[in-house]
Amino acid sequence: MIPYGSLVVYVTPNKDRRYIKRLEEGQDWHSNDGVLSAETVHAANFGSEVRTSLDIPIRVLEATLHDRLKGLKRQTQIIYPKDIAYICLRLGAGPGRTIIEAGCGSGGLTTGLSWFCGPTGRVVSHEAREEFIKLARRNLEWAGVGDNVEIVHRDIADGFCIDNADALFLDVRTPWDYLDHAVKAVKPGAMFGFLVPTVDQVSKLLMGLEKGPFADIEVCEILMRNWKPVADRLRPEDRMNAHTGFLIFCRHQERSADFEYSRPLGTRQRKQEAARQARLAESGANPYDDSETAGDDE
């Protein structure tokens, strides 16, 4: 039996259209294929077929996290499931972990983080716009998660509301402006993640990261191409989920000149390092903890 209160995916024979609905006692589902009574669905099992008042077969599926993310109401550009999955893995979202997020927007990533962190984890999301906070809370409640989420109405220019977090993710326009606050909000060695849409933003963020205690930097984008599941005519779909944003990840890391200058560098890497040193000198920044060693090597 399917419990009342469950999120249920109804799949129709008409082009396999999918509808996500919450099963509530006494609330039948009305569609062009007829009426599907809540009692009929309640008596069925996930993975079975039920019939409407017009005798149309409907497949009944349990809503996965992927289904819930696709069903969220949006007022902002949402982070796609393909990106959310990798973000959660890179941040180490899981039981007992504390993850900081800013801003939450429509709550797509917040939903994923809440799901992965579970009852013993904690997600602290910062959002400067109150209308997005209300939307994110509604989406979390609809998706059946959020008990482990705290959404704070706060501009992160004033800093984050907690410290000693295990990881931090920024989905804001100018993440390089908040790196000092970010370092103060996490444990030593914590993971950081960022999402920005343009290459100019990536470059500015990388320049900000090279001035501080950050290492193991990764820049990537995730492209997803589906294939038509026809055994004797297997080929890619005509369309794909391509670029949706740049993802940048790094770790909080103490840095020393000894370690940096011990790296074997090729010609291109030496030129890149020289350019980086020039930028640091021009900005007056010193990312190294061991300033004496840095001076000796220079």
Image (cartoon, rainbow, N blue to C red):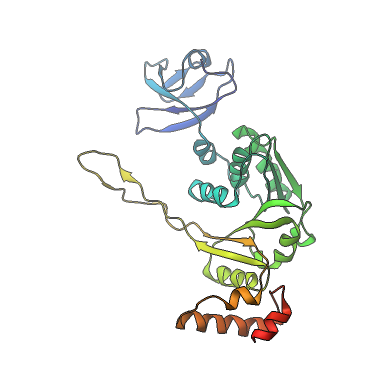
Residue 111, image x, y percentages: 61, 41
Residue 231, image x, y percentages: 23, 38
Q: How many marks?
A: 0
Residue 84, image x, y percentages: 54, 48
Residue at (43% x, 20% y) in the render: 34
Pick whichever, 120 or 295, lies toward us. Answer: 295
Q: Is residue 232 left or right of residue 263?
A: left
Quick one: quadrant of the C terminus? bottom right
Q: Residue most toward the left?
A: 232
> Is residue 184 positioned above or below 287 on the image?
above
Residue at (58% x, 41% y) in the render: 73
Residue 21, image x, y percentages: 53, 28
Residue 295 in which image quadrant:
bottom right
> Is residue 74 positioned above or below 118 on the image?
below
Residue 233 in which image quadrant:
top left
Q: Is residue 74 left or right of residue 226?
A: right
Look at the image and tell me whether residue 123 can be seen.
yes
Residue at (59% x, 34% y) in the render: 143
Residue at (76% x, 49% y) in the render: 153
